[in-house]
């Protein structure tokens, strides 16, 4: 359990470190690196023995606009266009100023991580995720969150950023002005240590791993499969409630309608964006697959037995093989293949009449240039051709998108909208940019809010600490 206690000047802490960061995912490590560069001592507390969290479970794609990687590939993009895409998807349901700040800073953060910390970014091309009007996903060569986190961890070691693993943050200590004075953490053997700090940055993600909080704030997903890190227990949210912080959009989440079943491995939505379709066990399509994979989670769950089949062809199959997750589904035997429609029906158990009807509907849309009954327009060059492939999938909750309300510097706001004295939040710990539900999630929103806001908040926290020291405000 987490807690908060008021303290006075008589309390003695075990150690003093100016900035404490809770959580060693992309947000926490990016914040730590940014603050360390400013000359402030930082410690990152990580509950797991090895940093992982939601970052490691992601595809490692960070959206950014106006980067040199885009220019090298002839991609025309800007922070303004990226902002418009995000706001269009979330229906202006997020803090516009925070969205704008993230978009403006995104290119600089990507290039800073590359130039200063050796993260070998490359631009993902070939398809656009729903809602993005330009190729702006930046990832490392292996296209996995685990690899991206590995580069950040290595950068932290080179920068001598103190990273304390197997350290579960448990208790906050505040004064009468609600200023964070310190934090305690628990070791696996049950022992507790305390750290005095000048600022605290929460990067401990959301509450998707806490069934009670999910049922309270996202009742529609209380029985859904959770495919996120079990450590996402909502500590930031619980601390915030005790501190009187403002919380927003707690019903927001990122779902995904394409998790292989029963293997539970992510199947990239590129399979849909490049021409694939989803059918239920009756062999019928049930939605416009191009609307978005987050809201598709609930749509898939609503189908018979809560499952669907992703149907695509050899062209798409070959492109998907670039993804380590998809290669895993192949190794697990989750990908079923057929030389024609009849063969695909036999290996999947789907009605051949249903599959033939779907293919015919796609052909009519492409030939007429008119959207189908779900509003999706098919292109002739993307029509599926034999041989075919299929993966049985289900919908799942990946991570929550609501949390502590923050300003454009990552400072946590109280109920009156004022910034709290020295508390910051980034990533899943903070209110995201996806609006109030699942429809507003735009691919990459999570790592954008973690990585880019992590750098913004880390720099601001460090500058505030240094300014306080210079003016004699900080405690001796």
Image (tube, rainbow, N blue to C red):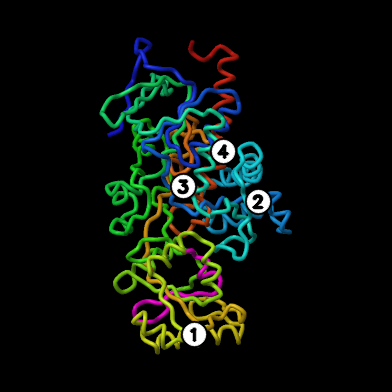
Mark earlier in primary sequence (4, 1): 1
Pointer 3: residues within 10 angstroms few (<14), some, or many (20+)? many
Give percent across and percent down for residue 347: 37, 81
Pointer 4: residues within 10 angstroms few (<14), some, or many (20+)? some
| Residue that numbered label 2 is attached to | 65
Q: What whole-number distance in Å separates the C-alpha atoms at marks 1 and 3?
A: 37 Å
Give the residue at x 58% y 36%: 456
Dot in front, 4 or 3? 3
Q: Is residue 374 visible?
A: yes
Pointer 1: residues within 10 angstroms few (<14), some, or many (20+)? some
Compared with 432, 40 (above or below) is above
Q: Which region is colored magenta?
A: 268-286
Give the residue at x 45% y 21%: 197
Compared with 466, 10 (above or below) is above
| Label 4: element kind | loop
Q: Seen in the image, is 296 located left or right of residue 474?
A: left
| Label 1: element kind | helix
Question: In front here: 464 or 244?
Answer: 464
| Residue that numbered label 1 is attached to | 359
Give percent across and percent down for residue 95: 53, 46
Q: What whole-number distance in Å separates the C-alpha atoms at marks 3 and 2?
A: 21 Å
Name the chief secondary structure element in magenta: loop
Give percent across and percent down for residue 116: 64, 36
| Residue that numbered label 4 is attached to | 408
Dot in front, 4 or 1? 1
Q: What whole-number distance in Å separates the C-alpha atoms at marks 2 and 1?
A: 37 Å
Q: Is residue 421 visible?
A: no
| Residue that numbered label 3 is attached to | 55
Question: Residue 249, which numbered label?
Answer: none
């Amino acid at each position: 359990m987490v807690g908060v206690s008021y303290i006075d000047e008589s309390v003695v802490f075990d150690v003093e470190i100016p900035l404490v960061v809770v959580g060693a995912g992309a947000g926490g490590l990016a914040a730590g690196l940014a603050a360390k560069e400013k000359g402030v001592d930082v410690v990152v507390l990580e509950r797991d023995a090895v940093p992982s969290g939601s970052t490691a479970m992601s595809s490692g794609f960070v959206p950014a606009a106006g980067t040199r990687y885009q220019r090298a590939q002839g991609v025309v993009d800007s922070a303004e266009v990226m902002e418009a895409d995000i706001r269009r998807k979330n229906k202006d349901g997020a803090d516009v100023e925070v969205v704008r700040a993230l978009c403006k800073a995104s290119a600089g953060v990507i290039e800073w991580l590359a130039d200063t910390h050796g993260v070998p970014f490359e631009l993902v091309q070939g398809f656009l995720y729903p809602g993005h009007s330009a190729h702006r996903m930046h990832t490392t060569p292996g296209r996995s969150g685990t690899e991206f986190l590995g580069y950040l961890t290595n950068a932290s070691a080179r920068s001598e950023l103190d990273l304390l693993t197997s350290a579960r943050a448990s208790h906050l200590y505040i004064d009468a002005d609600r200023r964070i004075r310190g934090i305690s953490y628990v070791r696996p053997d049950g022992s507790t240590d305390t750290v005095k700090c000048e600022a605290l940055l929460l990067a401990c993600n959301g509450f998707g791993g806490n069934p009670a909080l999910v049922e309270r704030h996202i009742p529609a997903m209380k029985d859904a499969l959770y495919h996120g890190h079990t450590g996402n227990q909502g500590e930031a949210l619980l601390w915030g409630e005790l501190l009187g912080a403002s919380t927003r959009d707690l019903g927001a989440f990122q779902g995904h309608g394409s998790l292989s079943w029963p293997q539970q491995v992510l199947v990239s939505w590129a399979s849909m964006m490049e021409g694939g379709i989803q059918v239920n066990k009756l062999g019928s399509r049930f939605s416009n697959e191009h609307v978005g994979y987050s809201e598709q989670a609930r749509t898939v769950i609503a189908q018979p037995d809560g499952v669907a089949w992703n149907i695509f062809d050899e062209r798409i199959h070959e492109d998907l093989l670039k993804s380590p997750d998809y290669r895993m589904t192949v190794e697990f035997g989750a990908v079923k293949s057929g030389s024609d429609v009849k063969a695909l029906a036999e290996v999947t158990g789907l009605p051949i009449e249903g599959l033939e009807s779907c293919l015919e509907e796609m052909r009519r849309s492409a030939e007429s240039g008119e959207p189908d009954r779900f509003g999706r327009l098919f292109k002739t060059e993307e029509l599926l051709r034999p041989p075919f492939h299929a993966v049985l999938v289900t919908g799942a909750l990946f991570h929550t998108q609501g949390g502590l309300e923050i300003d454009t510097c990552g400072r946590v706001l109280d109920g009156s909208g004022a910034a709290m004295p020295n508390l910051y939040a980034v990533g899943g710990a903070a209110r995201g940019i996806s609006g109030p539900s699942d429809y507003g999630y735009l691919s990459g929103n999570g790592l954008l809010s973690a990585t880019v806001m992590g750098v913004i908040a880390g720099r601001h926290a460090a500058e505030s600490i240094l300014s306080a020291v210079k003016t004699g405000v900080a405690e001796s």
